[in-house]
């Protein structure tokens, strides 16, 4: 089997967010969770556990977002000093 983009899902203190998903996206998340659980040896991975690392991975890969965030942090630090 090919390596999925997400690795093992770590347990972290959650912040509750409610979101509505299209049924097709939910089905795909269920299937992704099933495949990832099988690949990583975990019992079950629910869509609620998949979404946070998927969003984090998406944002990490967005170069424009990363650059804007670095610039914002730089400006905030300059204003403090």
Image (cartoon, rainbow, N blue to C red):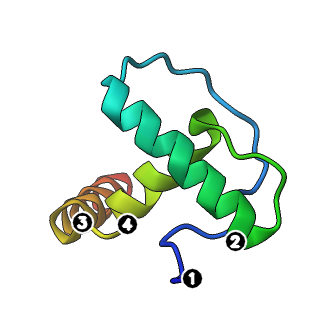
**Mark number for residue 62?**
3
Q: How far is disc 3 from disc 1 in space, using C-alphas?
A: 27 Å
User: Which of 33 and 58 lies nearest the eye of the viewer?
Assistant: 33
- Most extreme residue toward the bottom, as rendered? 2
When the figure is inspected, residue 47 is found, relative to residue 38, above or below; the finding is above
Q: Position of residue 72 (x, y in %)?
A: 25, 56
CA separation, marks 4 and 3? 6 Å
Query: Which residue position holds label 4?
Result: 60
Q: Which residue is mark 2?
A: 39
Q: CA distance from mark 2 to mark 4?
A: 23 Å
Please give the count of numbered marks on the rendered protein: 4
The residue lying at 34 percent from left, 59 percent from top is 58
Q: Nearer the viewer, mark 1 or mark 4?
A: 1
Residue 35 horizontal/vertical position (percent): 61, 60
Q: Are marks 4 and 3 in contact (CB under 8 Å)?
A: yes
Q: Nearer the viewer, residue 25 or 66?
A: 25
The one of 79 and 57 positioned closer to us in this rendering:
57
User: In the structure shown, which secondary structural element does the residue marked by tag 4 occupy?
Assistant: helix
- Label 2: how many Cα within 10 Å (few below 14, some 14–19, many 20+): some
Label 3 environment density (alpha carbons within 10 Å; few <14, some 14–19, many ≥20)? few
Q: Earlier in the sequence, mark 2 or mark 3?
A: 2
- Tell me the residue at 55%/41% (across/down): 30
Q: What is the secondary structure assignment of the residue under circle 2?
A: helix
Which quadrant is home to the N terminus? bottom right
Residue at the extreme left of the image, as rendered: 64
Q: In terms of sequence position, does the residue under pointer 3 or pointer 1 come before the other?
A: 1
State the residue position of label 1: 1
Tell me, yes or no, whether the two marked residues, 1 and 2, touch with CB atoms within 8 Å: yes
When the figure is inspected, residue 62 is found, relative to residue 50, above or below; the finding is below
User: How many residues crowd mark 4 within 10 Å: few (<14), some (14–19), many (20+)?
Assistant: few
Q: CA distance from mark 1 to mark 4?
A: 25 Å
On the question of residue 52 being in view, the answer is no
């Amino acid at each position: 089997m090919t390596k999925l983009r997400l690795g093992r899902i770590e347990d972290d203190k959650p912040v509750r967010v409610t979101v509505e998903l299209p049924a097709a996206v939910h089905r795909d998340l269920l299937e992704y969770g099933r495949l990832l659980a099988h690949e990583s040896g975990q019992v079950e991975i629910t869509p609620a556990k998949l979404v946070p690392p998927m969003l984090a991975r998406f944002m990490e890969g967005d170069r424009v977002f990363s650059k804007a965030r670095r610039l914002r942090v730089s400006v905030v630090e300059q204003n403090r000093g």
